[in-house]
Structures are given as C-alpha cells and as structure tokens.
Image (cartoon, rainbow, N blue to C red):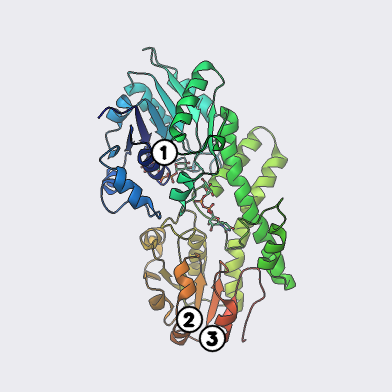
Amino acid sequence: MNYSKHILCIGAGYVGGPTMAMIAYKCPRYRVTVVDINPARILQWQSDDLPIYEPGLDDIVRSARGKNLFFSTDIETGIREADIIFVSVNTPTKSFGVGAGMAADLQYWEKTARQILNVSTTSKIIVEKSTLPVKTAKAMERILSSTTNGVHFEVVSNPEFLAEGSAVRDLENPDRVLIGSRQTPGGLSARDELVEIYANWVPPDKILTVDIWSSELSKLVANAFLAQRISSINAISSLCEKTDADITQVARAVGMDTRIGNRFLNASVGFGGSCFKKDILNLVYICRYYGLNEVADYWEHVTRINDFQKERFVTNMLNVMFNTLAGKRIAMFGFAFKADTGDTRESPAIYIAKRLLEEQAELVISDPRAIDNARDDLKDYLPRVSFTPDPYVAAAKSHAIALMTEWDDYRYLDYESIHRSMIKPAFIFDGRNVLDHRRLFEIGFNVYPVGKPVLTHL
Ligand code: UDX
Ligand code: UDX
C-alpha cells in the first residue's frame, strides 16, 4: 500500500501507545509505527493483552493493527523510513547530581536524539510528545544540527494532554491540540504537516498553533494548574474537618461560580500519577534557575500540600484507631492513582501503605486492575502485605478499610456482609468521598471521610 505519511513514535508507553493508535485509527492513509527499547512491551502491544488498561483502547488497536499500525523493536529501520518522528520516551525526575529530585532526567531524550541523528539519511520532523522543560527544543536542535550530510531536522512541540482512564476519549475529542514551532519557513511548514494530521478528526478551531517555547511551557503550566486546584481543595478539606464544614458543599458552592468552574475540585487522599509532581518540580527548578525564588516557592507548596494531605490521612487513622496500628489488619480498597487505570505511579496509596507498614499494620491490597503493579511497588514489604482482587476477602477480619481509589466497584459492595466479616469496632476511611457515608454509619461502621464531619459510634 502507498501510504501518504510515514509516522514513527519512539516510546510505546501510556502516552505513545494510545496516541499513535488513535492517529492510525483516524488516518488509514498513514503508516504508523511504534517502537520501544523494551521487547516485552512491544510483544504485549502485538498481543490481545495490551500493556496498559484504557477503556476503549483494545478496540482501536485491534481495528488498525496490522493494517496501518505496527509495533516493533527495530528502532533504526523505523527512524530511517519515517518522515515524522514523535518522541515519547520517559523523562523522569532526576535522581542524581545537579537538580536531583527536581529537574527532568533528559538522558533518554538525548540518547534518542543522537540515535535519530546517526541513523537518518533523509530530513525529518521531530515532534516532542513527552513533557519537557521549556527550552528543551533548543538542546534538541543543537544535537540534531551537528550533522554534515545535508539532512535537516525540524523540531516541533506537540504536548499530550490525555488523562489516564479517559485517554481514548481525550484523544478522540480533545479540548485542544497544541502545536509549537519555530516561526521560520521550515518551522511553519513542519507545523502545517502536524496540523494536517490532527485535522483528520479535530475541528480546526481546536488546533492551536503557537511558538515553540510557549508550547513547551504551556504543558507544564496546565499540569501545575490542575494539581494546584487539587491542593487548594485538599488544603480547605483540612479546615473543614476542624470546623464541621463539608468540603463537598464548599466545592459545589465555589465551583458554581463560572469563573472558577466545577471540575477538578474533588477532595482526596492526594493526587498521584506520573505527571503532576514531576512537572511541578520541573517548573520549580526552572524558576529557581532563573532566580525567581518566590515563584518557585509558590509552586513548590502545591506538592507540599499534597504530601501533607497523604500524611494527614495516616495520622488520622492512627489517632482514631486508639493510637496503635501494630498487628492490625487493614484492607486497602484500590491502589491505582485514579480509577479506570492499572497505573500506580506516584499513587498516594504507595505512600500510605508504606506509612501504615511502618506503624506495623498488616495490609491486604485489593484493586481491580493494579494488583501486579502494587505487588511490585511493595515487594520489599512481604510478607506483611498481601494482595487479592476480591474486596470481600480483603476486608474479612480487618479492623479498617482505607479506600484509596474511586473505582465504581467499591460503591456497590454488600457493606452489611463486609461489616459482619470485620473486627469491631470497624472503621472506614474514605479517601475519595465516594461511599454512602450515612448508610455505612447505619450499618455500624465508624466513618471517616475527607473534609466532612465524621460519623462515629465511639
Ligand atoms: C512519559 C513521561 O512520563 C511523560 O512525561 C511524557 O509526557 C511522555 O513519556 P509515559 O508514556 O506514561 O509518559 O511513560 P512510559 O509509559 O514510561 O513510556 C515510555 C516508554 O519509552 C517506555 O516503554 C520505555 O521503554 C520507552 N523508552 C525509554 C524507549 O523506547 N527508549 C528510551 O531510550 C527510553
Ligand atoms: C494529568 C492531566 O490531567 C493530563 O492532562 C496530563 O496530560 C497528564 O496528567 P492524569 O495524571 O492521567 O492526567 O490524571 P488526572 O485525571 O489529571 O488525575 C491526577 C490525580 O489527581 C489523580 O490521582 C486523581 O485521583 C487526582 N484528582 C483529580 C483529585 O484528587 N481530585 C480531582 O478533583 C481530580
């Protein structure tokens, strides 16, 4: 078949896999190849058991795979044959040297850029898909322009805004697609090539073209603003608990102001996920680099409030369970960082589990999708932690349930029989405010939501 574009994506992760599957699905005339250094991951993408769980993803992969969507470990051939290369390798927080714990670790990025440089025999457009510190494109351009064989690379920024659990919906119907380019003839023509791809299914008024630095920075800022909203509502949840106010009612009253808006105002046990903390720390690092210490402090506090919220949850459990958790069995309902994903990266459940284990509690972790990742996250704590997909098994003979993830499954359990199977007094700590607290109280539970009055028989 004669394809009209050859697209490559390096990095078959949570971002690269679904994004490329959607492009292939929407654009049958393009050939889309996704490569990764991890052969096991590629094998999974080629199988019926995809490496990530996303509602709707199986269907679009199945319909495009083998026709115009291909998964491979042959990175070099992929590079050689592509006109447009999306780079979606991970950019974790640096764990060593200058900027450790704050700055982005760009080693995979640089390695990928050098591989592109070494292998390419024709000019290409390089698309930054990964979230990167502002000005990364400049470093990319420097590396990529060190060739003498006449090959030219145009770097554009096209950050991804999909959220896990709703990735397919977000990709199919995005709030906006952001494309940042140099304002040179080459940059503008590369930008137009990208616009052409998305125009296959995204309305033109939602495709936003900007300069490259604004594009890189906007992604960091979008995540920082989202995380800030959660830290704002979580900060107020702690005040609600002291003043008998109810955070749900406060959020509703505040969110009805259209200037504020009602989304992303759910108080919780804290935000998780691979992006929020990493991107804020990145922003903080960049601000400090430019001497903007007040600005850096301001954003750093968003992550501090998140840490405070997680720690508060544990301290509260300890206090109300008579100041000792030693030897007590605690069931964790959910381990994923949010519902509808098996991903546990930076999940608040990891921190809380470790703190409970420090208090010598015995943990039973239950989750519909994240058990394998949870087992890996807590592998150093066996045998004091065990795992079961069945919440009834997890709760039996427990002193407490700590709800970590807002899976729908947990709303509709038979809490009467769960209560009967537990040690009394039985506690529920609802870290997501998704359960029917009044009903649980009537069954006999002592109920501790986030940012709401407690319902207790004690
Ligand atoms: C990652 C970053 O976390 C995010 O900030 C960025 O926007 C996109 O990349 P995600 O897709 O969730 O997001 O990461 P991950 O699932 O870890 O996927 C990255 C993939 O790149 C992995 O499969 C890894 O094997 C692959 N990789 C990494 C390469 O193919 N080459 C490398 O040199 C390094
Ligand atoms: C986020 C951004 O939403 C997305 O645009 C970006 O591309 C990647 O980072 P993601 O991390 O997948 O996506 O999920 P998101 O829905 O943003 O949730 C992040 C965390 O915040 C989760 O732990 C979630 O439970 C928590 N959260 C979200 C709250 O605690 N309260 C809320 O009101 C909303």
Q: As rendered, which of 415 and 73 lies closer to the eye?
A: 415
> Mark 1: which amino acid?
Val
Q: Position of residue 457 (x, y in %)?
A: 61, 86
Number of residues whose C-alpha sits closer than 10 Å to that of mark 2, classed few (under 14), some (14–19) or many (20 or more):
some
Q: Which residue is mark 1?
A: 89
Nearer to the camera, 454 or 325: 454
Q: Does any atom of ligand 2 lie closer than 8 Å to the CB of label 3?
A: no
Sequence-first tag of 2 and 1: 1
Q: Nearer the viewer, mark 3 or mark 1?
A: 3
Marks 2 and 1, how far apart at CA: 43 Å
Q: Is mark 1 within 8 Å of ligand 1?
A: yes
Q: Nearer the viewer, residue 265 or 177?
A: 177
Residue bearing mark 2: 415
Label 3 amino acid? Ile
Left or right for 133, reference 117: right
The quarter of the picture where the C terminus appears is: bottom right
Query: Residue 443 bears which disc, if any?
Result: 3
Q: CA distance from mark 3 to mark 1?
A: 49 Å
Q: Give the residue drawn at x 45%, y 26%.
A: 193
Secondary structure under tag 1 reads: loop
The amino acid on which the numbered mark 2 sits, given as a three-letter code, is: Tyr
